[in-house]
Amino acid sequence: MKKIAVLGSSNMDFVFTVEEMPRTGETIKSLEFHKVPGGKGANQACACGKLGGDCIFLSAVGKDDSGEILLDSLKRAGVCTEKVLRAEKDTTGMAAIMVNAKGDNSIVIVPGANKACGKSYVEDNTEVIKEADVVLTQLETPEEGVYQFIEAAKAAGKTVILNPAPAPEGIPEEILQGLDYLTPNETELNKLTGMPVETLEELEKASETLLKKGVKNVIVTIGKRGALLSNEAGNRICPAFTGIKAVDTTAAGDTFNAGLAVGLAEGRPLTEAILFANAAAAISVTRKGAQTSIPTKEEADELISAGNEPGSRACTDIWRLPQG
């Protein structure tokens, strides 16, 4: 098993279950409330650990109860947290999450201690990057730190995965050129490219613009349809698992990204790594919460085995040649 280094945010999630999302100016009642560990970085690190990865996490939390709870959750998942910064002044980051009856969510983030994960923090942890084989990061921490992480990893010859969430208006081309894998969802792909993403053909065209800017592989998560893989060989659909009843999509994308990282670290071929990621994400949406919804490696592999009948699950190959 190759080593995985994750840089990213740590938040305490305040999760409100609602029938429908409130409209502007509307006050509604929450059906349930839960306080659970979260943050895109911490979710991905936790998922890497639960899915069997050898993972070290770079992040920052406050010297408060929320920070202790987050670190404990990661340690129980088998994640190395010795390099997580304990911020002196800022409290642990927070997120207010509303989940409706369909399992869709809406999130507001308070960065808090995550602001400490800048360029200097990454530079102080260069050895972590050098000792890793696969690196994974997102954009909930300061961009300067994320970009330094990517540049250092690329210079060291590591496999680099960027989950561009929350999506910025754009990513510098020199950063895109350092990416082995870029993993947006449809909304993020639209924001990054400014192109329509309603149809499969539009998704392909938008993905191909990122390939032309230097990204080696674009993997777009497309919900119930699965994932679209675009690279120099063409465009390939890895369908999602069928018969999955979603109750909460929080951390599904994070679980997918971790599954991809773990699959690659294990040496699985790319389509099999995506299959593993799809399986892990499929299980996560059937459970409530962020880190509480993440499955184990055994559960993900069991779902793959159970869905191994022809036509029942993912990576039935649909190829299209690059357009233009």
Image (tube, helix red, strand yellow):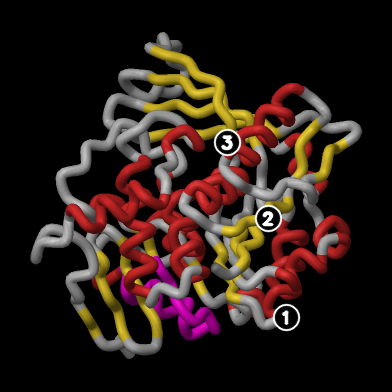
Q: Earlier in the sequence, mark 1 or mark 3?
A: 3
Q: Residue furthest left?
A: 310
Please tell me which residue is depicted at 49% across the width and 54% down the height of the picture.
Answer: 52
Q: CA distance from mark 1 to mark 3?
A: 30 Å
Would you name the residue on which mark 1 appears?
156
Could you say which disc has been placed on residue 38 in the image?
3
Three-letter code for the amino acid on which mark 1 is drawn = Ala
Q: CA distance from mark 1 to mark 2?
A: 17 Å
In the rendered structure, the answer to whether residue 310 lies left or right of residue 299 reads: left
Q: Earlier in the sequence, mark 3 or mark 2?
A: 3
Q: Quadrant of the C terminus?
A: bottom left
Tell me if residue 110 can be seen.
no
- Mark nearest the camera among 3 and 2 is 2
Could you say which disc has been placed on residue 56 in the image?
2
Three-letter code for the amino acid on which mark 2 is drawn = Ile
| Above-or-below relation of 308 to 73 | below
| Quadrant hosting residue 288 | top left
Closer to us: 300 or 118: 300
Give neighbour class at mark 2: few <14, some 14-19, many 20+ (Cα, 10 Å).
Answer: many
Q: Which residues are magenta?
A: 203-219
Q: Residue furthest right?
A: 88
